[in-house]
Image: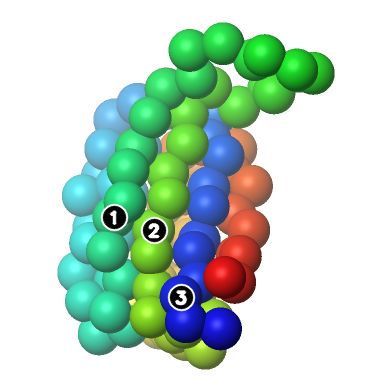
Amino acid sequence: MSEAYAVGQILVKDAAKWDTYRNQVPHTLEPWGGELVFRGVQANAMAGHCPYPDIVVIRFPSLAAVEGWFSSDSYQALIPIREQAADVTLVSYAT
């Protein structure tokens, strides 16, 4: 496996808190080699229904790096803010 991704599907509940959370995430990625691939807003559900209008995709060099990032103290400290700010489904994928 050469790369891995963290994919978040997001329903923002509090825009101000979401901005606070979102602005703090990038520094938590750096030690793990994580890089933002894209953030986007759902344009059209072409098949089925997706209740999450926003998405984020973050690339990591390995699945171990994704897991290390997620369990790191710096990211774990942001989870209470994230939970107040949005409903998020966060899933890791390996390629």
- Closer to the chain start, of discs 1 and 2, is 1
Q: Quadrant of the C terminus?
A: bottom right
**Which amino acid, by three-letter code, is at mark 3?**
Glu
Q: CA distance from mark 3 to mark 1?
A: 13 Å
Residue 15 visible somewhere in the drawing: yes
Residue 33 appears at what percent x and percent y? 28, 79
Do residues under tags 1 and 2 come within 8 Å of each other at their CB atoms? Answer: yes
Direction from residue 36 to residue 88 in the image, left or right: right
The residue at 38%/64% (across/down) is 59
Q: Nearer the viewer, residue 12 or 39?
A: 39
Q: Nearer the viewer, residue 91 or 83?
A: 91
Indicate the secondary structure of the residue bearing disc 2. strand
* Labels 3, 2: front one: 3
Q: Nearer the viewer, residue 39 or 13?
A: 39
Q: CA distance from mark 1 to mark 2?
A: 4 Å
Query: Dot 1: few (<14), some (14–19), or many (≥20) neighbours within 10 Å?
Result: some
Seen in the picture, residue 57 relative to 14 is either above or below; the reply is below
Label 1 sits on residue: 36
Query: Dot 2: few (<14), some (14–19), or many (≥20) neighbours within 10 Å?
Result: some
- Closer to the chain start, of discs 3 and 2, is 3
- Residue 85 placement: quadrant: top left
Residue 12 visible somewhere in the drawing: no
Q: Quadrant of the N terminus?
A: bottom right
Q: Colour scheme in the image?
A: rainbow
Label 2 sits on residue: 58
Label 3 sits on residue: 3
The residue at 46%/75% (across/down) is 3
Residue 89 appears at what percent x and percent y? 64, 47
Seen in the picture, residue 9 relative to 58 is either above or below; the reply is above
Residue 49 appears at what percent x and percent y? 76, 18
* Labels 3, 1: front one: 3
Direction from residue 92 to residue 23 in the image, left or right: left
